[in-house]
Image: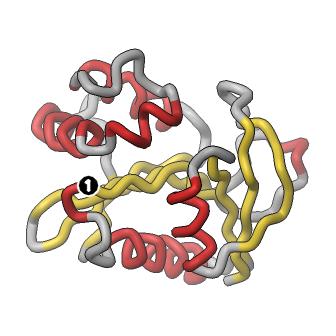
Amino acid sequence: MILQPLVPVDGALPGPALTEIAALYATNRAFFELSGDFPDPARITVEQVAAALADELAVDSAEVLLARSAGRLVGLAVTLAHHPDPASGDPDPWIGLLLIDSTAHREGHGRTVAALIEDRFRTAGRAGVRLAVLEDNATGLAFWQAQGYTLLRRAKDRDRGRPCLVMRKEL
């Protein structure tokens, strides 16, 4: 498994990558029904995905990572080297999103991508990593708990005010 940063070219995300990523998003209809990130999770478009990724990359210290296994896009992660609110006093980097192709769930890709992200942060000298799971996302919560993340607090997400569980793992 390799992680490659998604890098805009001349200010735009590459079209072939966006088509692949939109297909990956489309496999995760149940998650997007829960999150409400797209108006119609059954019909996620390339343009909607491009706008969502542009919003992610507009945040200082954000990185979008593409996870490939045997050349196939199996996942995507959005990370933040720092909390977007400097006043938070939060010293940890964040995993903002981990999305695995739903046709490849339960094959270990999520665990592998999470471990690779943790290794990147550990190598950068970071002591821990945080993330937020939507309170209604029982599957996501179980996954992150199985990876060793523990609950810090309940909070509302910054963008939409959805109830979340903020979790942390010591690196």
Image height of 130 relative to 15, above or below: below
> Horizontal placement of 20 versus 157: left or right?
left
Image height of 164 relative to 42, above or below: below
* Res 11 seen here: no
> Horizontal placement of 31 versus 15: left or right?
right
Q: Name the secondary structure under disc 1.
A: loop
* Residue 98, position as x, y percentages in the image: 45, 56
Q: Amino acid at mark 1?
A: Asp
Report the front residue among 134 and 61. 134
* Residue 145, position as x, y percentages in the image: 63, 73
| Image quadrant in which you'd find residue 75 | bottom left
Report the front residue among 142 and 99. 142
* Residue 96, position as x, y percentages in the image: 56, 50
Q: Which residue is mark 1?
A: 101
Q: Residue at x 66, y 27 (%)?
A: 159
The C terminus appears in which quarter of the rendering?
Answer: bottom right
* Res 4 seen here: yes
Q: How is the image coloured?
A: secondary structure
Q: Residue at x 74, y 53 (%)?
A: 165
| Image quadrant in which you'd find residue 130 | bottom right
